[in-house]
Image (cartoon, grey):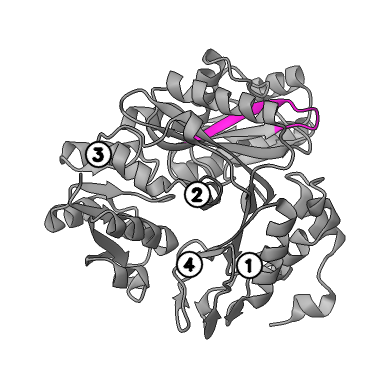
């Protein structure tokens, strides 16, 4: 087992990893940028090292600085968290070459599933349903038009690399395809250094269902059921829950088995997520694999009782999985709300600055993962998430009621947050009856635009 682990991330996920390491008797080294010098997770680590100025490119994405910190601190392993370098195959290779264990998939697996076009081909080979689309990357607009005419509009233009909704465009006719094709390529090139795109048939009004996977280095792969991530805006998730109220036991089993089949085919180990679109007829289609721990892994932890970070660390150390498939059971219902420092009334404009008062909620079934505190200054340089609020109860209705109560209790003074919007979504009849889909938030915002005085408010 590892003696010291460096956490190559920031915020709540750095804190999350540090907590599990401490419980496992593992010392931690936290790295930070100059903008995060007052971060809460730094107080919980055994050692801290500044790796550069605020811009991510000069700190959390600075591979030489992180490796230098790891060597100076004499660590055995690096946990990359999510985002930043967590799906960077080159970083994983550098770690290996320096005899530092990368707590995640091996570089070959990251490369295989990280490219969405290649992952799609692997899904086909593993007999996992995929959305009809192009046969590999699309190199020019002429080919894009030919593929779109074969598939029929609408189509989705998707970047082969990266995630987070960048490099994605919906096209409903030839002109929008041509403009979207070039825009998606340019955005993907700027965001990921790879302008490769491919096309898929656009599935109207789907649910977004993802299956949590765990695999070890001994060939064992299990799934930990699903998370329903359909409440999102511009492909950014706002609310996640498990189990999905839309899945029957038979469909749940079928999707879980498909995800495991793909992971085995890819020889995948460590934590990962297989993502699907689910249409109203119960047909599901593979869209991508996230080769890392997800923001919303906490939802799965609540309903299964499995510490996913602990399993990541054990697997990276060469241990077999602690669980067999038959050991994993769903217990109750969990809902997660992402609390972001954003203003929904101003098109989700980031709202950095100092939190003058921070009083998180509590009570039965409530969990709050956050790096925030009263007096904490939210830097403008990174993701705007303040934390993740979870409610776990015996039924979905009880979980919704507990979450609404917790959101009412939550006090965050200073920045604007997404709390008011989250409360409206949770209390909406379409969400309560599980009639929502991935387009729900946009439809709701279009139907309830902010009043003129709200838009002008400072």
Numbered disc 1: secondary structure? strand
| Image coords of residue 433 (percent x, y) | 82, 49
Drawn side of residue 405 relative to residue 124, left or right: right
Drawn side of residue 355 relative to residue 52, left or right: right
Numbered disc 3: secondary structure? loop
Q: Earlier in the sequence, mark 3 or mark 4?
A: 3
Q: Which mark is residue 317?
A: 3
Q: Which residue is mark 1?
A: 349
Neighbours of disc 2 within 10 Å: few (<14), some (14-19), many (20+): some
Task: Say if mark 4 contacts mark 2, CB within 8 Å.
Answer: no
Nearer the observer, 82 or 362: 362
Separation of residues labelled 1 and 2 (CA atoms)? 31 Å
Q: Which mark is residue 370?
A: 4
Q: Which residues are magenta?
A: 278-290
Nearer the observer, 366 or 163: 366
Neighbours of disc 4 within 10 Å: few (<14), some (14-19), many (20+): many
């Amino acid at each position: 087992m590892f003696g010291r682990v460096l956490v190559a991330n920031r915020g709540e996920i750095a804190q999350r990893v540090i907590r599990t390491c401490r419980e496992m008797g593992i010392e931690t080294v936290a790295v930070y940028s100059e903008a995060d010098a007052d971060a809460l997770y730094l107080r919980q680590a055994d050692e801290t090292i500044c790796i550069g100025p605020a811009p991510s490119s000069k700190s959390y994405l600075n591979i030489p600085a992180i490796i230098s910190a790891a060597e100076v601190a004499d660590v055995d392993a690096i946990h990359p968290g999510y985002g930043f370098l967590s799906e960077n195959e080159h970083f994983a290779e550098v770690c290996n070459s320096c005899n530092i264990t990368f707590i995640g998939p091996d570089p070959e697996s990251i490369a295989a599933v990280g490219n969405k076009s290649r992952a799609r081909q692997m899904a086909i080979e593993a007999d996992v349903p995929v959305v009809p689309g192009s046969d590999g990357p699309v190199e020019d607009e002429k080919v894009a038009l030919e593929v779109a005419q074969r598939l029929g509009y609408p189509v989705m233009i998707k970047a082969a690399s990266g995630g987070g909704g960048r490099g994605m465009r919906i096209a409903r006719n030839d002109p929008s395809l041509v403009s979207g094709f070039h825009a998606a390529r340019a955005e993907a090139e700027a965001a990921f250094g790879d302008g490769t795109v491919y096309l898929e048939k656009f599935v109207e009004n789907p649910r977004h269902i993802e299956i949590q996977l765990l695999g070890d280095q001994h060939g064992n792969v299990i799934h930990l059921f699903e998370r329903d991530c359909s409440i999102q805006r511009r492909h950014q998730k706002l609310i996640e829950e498990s189990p999905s109220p839309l899945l029957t036991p038979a469909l749940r089993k079928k999707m879980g088995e498909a995800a495991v089949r793909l992971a085995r085919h890819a020889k995948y180990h460590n934590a990962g997520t297989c993502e699907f679109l689910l249409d109203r007829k119960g047909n599901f289609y593979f869209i991508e694999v996230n080769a890392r721990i997800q923001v919303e892994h906490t939802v799965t932890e609540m309903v299964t009782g499995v510490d996913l970070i602990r399993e990541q660390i054990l697997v990276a150390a060469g241990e077999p999985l602690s669980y067999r498939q038959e050991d994993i059971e769903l217990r109750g219902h969990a809902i997660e709300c992402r609390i972001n420092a954003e203003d929904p009334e101003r098109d989700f404009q980031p709202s950095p600055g100092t939190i003058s008062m921070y009083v998180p909620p509590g009570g039965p079934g409530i969990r709050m993962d956050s790096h925030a505190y009263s007096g904490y200054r939210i830097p403008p340089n990174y993701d705007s998430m303040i934390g993740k609020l979870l409610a776990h109860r015996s039924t979905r209705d009880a979980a919704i009621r507990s979450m609404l109560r917790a959101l009412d209790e939550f006090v965050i003074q200073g920045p604007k947050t997404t709390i008011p919007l989250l409360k409206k979504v949770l209390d909406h009849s379409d969400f309560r009856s599980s009639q929502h889909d991935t387009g729900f938030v946009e439809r709701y915002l279009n139907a309830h635009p902010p009043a003129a005085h709200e838009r002008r408010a400072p």
